[in-house]
Image (tube, rainbow, N blue to C red):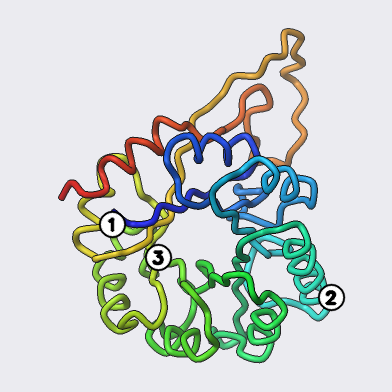
Amino acid sequence: MPVIEVCVDSVQSALASQEGGADRVELCDNLFEGGTTPSAGAIAVARERLRIKLHVIIRPRGGDFLYSDVEFAVMQRDIATAKSLGADGVVIGLLTAEGDVDVPRTRQLVELARPMSVTFHRAFDVAREPFKALETLIELGIDRVLTSGQEESVTEGAELIAELIVKAANRIIVMPGAGFNQRNVGRVVAKTGAREIHVAGFARVESGMRYRNERVFMGGELRCPEYSHAVTDAGIVRNIRRNCDVP
């Protein structure tokens, strides 16, 4: 049975993941853009209420992974905050303009994060050369790398993921993520040989608002529903865990 990490964007979802049998959560904000750093309040309350491990994404904005000096300073401060609030790990990802791992800055963040665990996130999936990037992360002492196999989902990227796991040779954990569901998880785990997987288990929850002004939206042109939101469903997480060993 692989270790199951659930991607969540709220304390409520983190607690539902725990109820569903998750081993760890990755706490984010703003999943519409792939996840950004959550608030200090969310980290603190999650740590107070979770018994399982808590990893925190350190990503100052959506978009690419080429960061300015100011953004890098924010990442350093956010790692210090996560550490002070009792997080078990942080999740980072920095690239150069040429698509390689940003070695000097990644090394600085790893040193700042210790003794917390460090994961390199799906910035890896837009790196220019995956096997070179893998070796670089191993040299930097990264604990795990999250990847869809440089494809849209783990089903399309399973072949590369399997190759990366073989190349890693237990020097780093290669953790598949993106596109897992209750039906495909057993097949992908069997095909890749993954020891850890990164999943989501969201379901829509209707708002409790009785008065509604449907003309107004708080976001931009790509409008998310104002009167419902996504929350992790403990039953989905439970089914993913149950189906992990079904080829």
Residue at horizontal 70 percent and vertical 44 percent from the top = 48
Residue at horizontal 37 percent and vertical 61 percent from the top = 196
Residue at which label 3 appears: 175
Q: Earlier in the sequence, mark 3 or mark 2?
A: 2
Q: What is the C-alpha distance between the residues marked 3 and 2?
A: 30 Å
Toward the left, the furthest residue is 247
Toward the front, the furthest residue is 51
Residue at horizontal 62 percent and vertical 77 percent from the top = 94
Left or right side of 162 for 32:
right
Against 144, is 203 above or below?
A: above
| Residue type at tag 2 | Val
Q: Are marks 2 and 1 in contact (CB under 8 Å)?
A: no
Locate residue 39, reporting x and y percent: 77, 50
Residue at which label 2 appears: 70
Q: Earlier in the sequence, mark 1 or mark 3?
A: 1
| Residue type at tag 1 | Thr
The disc placed on residue 155 is: 1
Against 39, is 91 above or below?
A: below
Locate residue 15, reporting x and y percent: 57, 37
The quadrant holding residue 59 is: bottom right
